[in-house]
Image (cartoon, coloured by chain):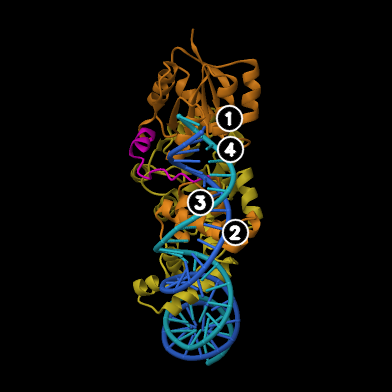
Chain colours: A orange, B yellow, C blue, D cyan
Amino acid sequence: MPHKLFIVDDHYMVIEGIHSLLQHEPGMEWMGHATHAASCLAFLQKEQPDVILMDINLPDMSGIDLCAEVKKQYPGIFVIGLSTFNQFSLIEKMMNSGASGYVLKNATREELVEAIQTVLKRKTYFSREAAQTMRKDDTRKIVLTRREKEVLELIADGMTNNEIAQKLFISVTTVETHRRNLLTKFEAKNIVSLVKTAIQQQIIQ
Amino acid sequence: MPHKLFIVDDHYMVIEGIHSLLQHEPGMEWMGHATHAASCLAFLQKEQPDVILMDINLPDMSGIDLCAEVKKQYPGIFVIGLSTFNQFSLIEKMMNSGASGYVLKNATREELVEAIQTVLKRKTYFSREAAQTMRKDDTRKIVLTRREKEVLELIADGMTNNEIAQKLFISVTTVETHRRNLLTKFEAKNIVSLVKTAIQQQIIQ
DNA sequence: CCAAAAATCCCGGAAAAACAGTATAGGTGG
DNA sequence: CCACCTATACTGTTTTTCCGGGATTTTTGG
């Protein structure tokens, strides 16, 4: 029985490209595609593939959330994340949503085939460059509490400690403490450089 | 005589996808592809296409710089920018490098064909969403002087006015003046929010 | 239930940024 | 050649951040 494959990506040229790359691959059945999350979920109500290749940047929902939803409703489907971005934070979030693998869009046909075959064996697959990113992990993870992230976002919006205190109905000194803890966690010498690295590391937008 | 087409993109699936989408299009000859800037330039020394579809994110050089180089050496070749990102700054830079059009990667086959046909008539083409982005241009352009950008970068790295003054061999008060001018230009209430918008608008990295 | 983590709060002082107001030298382009 | 932009520089005041010390209460997970 051939393994059924489905792809979710908003780029027609990528869908067409993967279709073309895999069309002569034995043991794989092309079930079709969706260009957004909603149509993907609608399709799954009727038919279920064995593997979904899922882009992270979709117009209506992030691939990360879509993956979590799919795994919740259909735990048996294996999801492979597909993205241009070779970022630790993205790969990590995708895997936490239950994905079985992550493939960059510069993957070769061979990598694609290997990814699909590997996840079907209930193993995890990363394309070469993605695996490299996961290995080095030089930017060791900065973990913020809910409140700290909230305060950081307001700081990044240009609010002063005083304004933040009023907005959150807490004392200025508390805001000041959060600010100091943030500086320690980021090992930053001031808030400006902190905000820069927070944006670069996708901690805030 | 069919129009010769070449594509530069580091994503095999995109190359394959475009090839597949355009293979039955009459009047177009597929010349081949390159996955990085160097091999593109090498190819052009032997043969020249009429149109190049050029990705902006290449491993060895930005598509923006590659486009400028290609147009300098071969002004007769029409370049169409190709990218995931629908950002004003990118589209603008690509057009300033001499591109004739800009197509997002979510373009349909019809848009691709139209883009190629349009640029061959020496006209400019934008895919639907890219055109939208160019039209609204709500973030009216913030123009910084060379020195202001230099100072801004140092500020964003967490340096104080004093440190910057020493580094640039100018007075602290001069740095302070630059800082004030930056705040005025960005209409920001402090440097933190300024740095945030500067990163978002790709003015700094 | 209890320890750890998270969130809250306080003082005081030094350092830096923000704000207001001015000014001058040098280069560029119409 | 003259207006305009750019880069430079200064004085003084107010506001905000940064840093040194704490401390208490609430929440959460094993």
Q: CA distance from mark 3 to mark 1?
A: 36 Å
First in residue order: circle 4 vs circle 3: 3
Q: Pointer 3 indicates a residue of which chain?
A: B
Is disc 2 on the same chain as disc 3? no
Q: Pointer 1 indicates a residue of which chain?
A: A
Given residues B9 and C18, the one toward you in this image is: C18
Stretch in magenta = A130-145
| Residue under numbered circle 4 | B107
Looking at the image, which residue is at 40% across and 25% down?
A125
1 and 2 marks in contact (CB < 8 Å): no
Residue B5: horizontal and vertical position, in percent? 47, 38
Q: Pointer 2 indicates a residue of which chain?
A: A
Residue B87: horizontal and vertical position, in percent? 56, 50
What element does badge 3 sit on? loop
Q: CA distance from mark 1 to mark 4?
A: 23 Å
Residue A135 inside the magenta-drawn segment: yes
Q: Residues within 10 Å of mark 1 (few under 14, many from 20)?
A: many
Q: CA distance from mark 2 to mark 4?
A: 52 Å
What element does badge 2 sit on? loop
Q: Residues within 10 Å of mark 4 (few under 14, many from 20)?
A: many
Question: Can you say whether A195 is above or below A95 in the image?
Answer: below
Foreground disc of the pair 1, 4: 1
Foreground disc of the pair 4, 3: 4
Q: Residue type at mark 1?
A: Leu
Q: Residue type at mark 4?
A: Ala
| Residue under numbered circle 1 | A66
| Residue under numbered circle 2 | A171
Q: Is residue B129 left or right of residue B174?
A: right
3 and 1 marks in contact (CB < 8 Å): no
Q: Residue type at mark 2?
A: Ser
What element does badge 4 sit on? loop
Residue B205 visible? The answer is no
